[in-house]
Amino acid sequence: MAVRIDGKALAAKVKSQVAAETAKLPRQPGLAVVLVGDDPASQVYVRGKEADCAECGIRSFPYRLPADTHQQELLALIEKLNADAAVDGILVQLPLPAPLEAEPVIEAIRPDKDVDCFHPYNVGRLNIGTPVFQPCTPAGVMEMLRESGISPAGKRCVVLGRSNIVGKPMAALLTQADGTVTLCHSRTPELTEITRQADILVSAVGKVNCVTADMVKDGAVVIDVAMNRNDAGKLCGDADFAAVEPKASYITPVPGGVGPMTRAMLMKNTTQAAAMQNGVAI
Ligand code: GUN
């Protein structure tokens, strides 16, 4: 039976470390959290991020904009936040409601305030292996592995999902940690053949029960990044948890796994951004 990696407990530990770092800074770090529209899931995420800020001694600057906000208005807000010395980090909750385009917004954020690590400059640095920030969800996964004593070095790592937010940067971090990484996606043939080779399987697909027990090697580490709702409306990940747990050596539950870690790493990045902006090393 797998060991469950407790993301909630580990996130609390990371946040207490961040709070200690924050207290040492010459001024309080600030995070602008921009939410456009009224997507209920995004509202929950954003409220969670603001609560984390309070816990870590970070000032949050909430911006709630209507769904019919124009691209130019959003870009103007980003420019204002870029220039605001009290704002160290800028987070624009994705996805943006149509027809707003995320790419120009991400590119407008000053790279040294890009605590999501989505700006092409930061993505480039990440892929070169000299990251300024680490993208929150993949960094949270790496922290969970480290805390569990699992090194990707020399291991076969399979990532399911090629999103810019999770799959691609996850593959980059695992590669940097000397894993041998295969990035799979919706067009990958013979998927089960590939996943069965994984020592570390990271799933970020967003489909209930898409990771079944036959896809998992005995003793594999299964990291479930997804946040889905099943037919009964219950939160769940990609893995058929009851069937996969007995085969895995380690597994992350949903909820209480990767989700809280993503938020904790956002706090860490914000404090790092504030330290950089104050010319202080942490
Ligand atoms: N939407 C889903 N995950 C994320 C995230 O990590 N950052 C932002 N900005 N939006 C998201």
Image (spheres, rainbow, N blue to C red):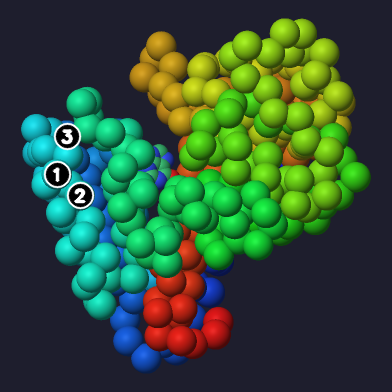
Residue 126 visible? The answer is: yes
Which of discs 2 and 3 lies nearer the camera? The answer is 2
Q: Is residue 266 above or below residue 105?
A: below
| Mark 3 or 1: the one toward you | 1
- Mark carried by residue 38: 3
Q: Is residue 89 above or below residue 206?
A: below
159 or 21: nearer the viewer: 159
Q: To which residue does mark 1 refer?
A: 72
In front of the other: 70 or 179: 70
Residues under numbered marks 1 and 2 in contact, where contact means CB atoms less than 8 Å apart: yes
Q: Quadrant of residue 80?
A: bottom left
Measured as percent of width and height from the top left, residue 133 is found at: 53, 61
Q: Percent position (x, y) of residue 123?
A: 54, 50
Residue found at x 62% / y 20%: 185
Tag 2: residue type? Answer: Leu
Label 1 – label 2 distance at C-alpha = 5 Å
Does residue 116 lie above or below 220 as drawn?
below
235 sits to left or right of 174: left
Percent of width and height locating residue 75? 20, 49
Q: Amino acid at mark 1?
A: Gln
Residue labelled with disc 2: 75
Instruction: Specify the quadrant that holds the C terminus.
Output: bottom right
SS at circle 2: helix
* Mark 1, other Cα within 10 Å: few <14 / some 14–19 / many ≥20: few
Q: Residue at x 77, y 8 (%)?
A: 190
In percent of the image, x 60 and y 43: which residue is there?
A: 169
Quadrant for the N terminus, please.
top right
Query: How busy is the neighbourhood of tag 2: few (under 14 within 10 Å), some, or many (20 plus)?
Result: some
Where disc 3 sits, the SS reads loop
Amino acid type at mark 3: Asp
- Quadrant for ligand 1 reads top left
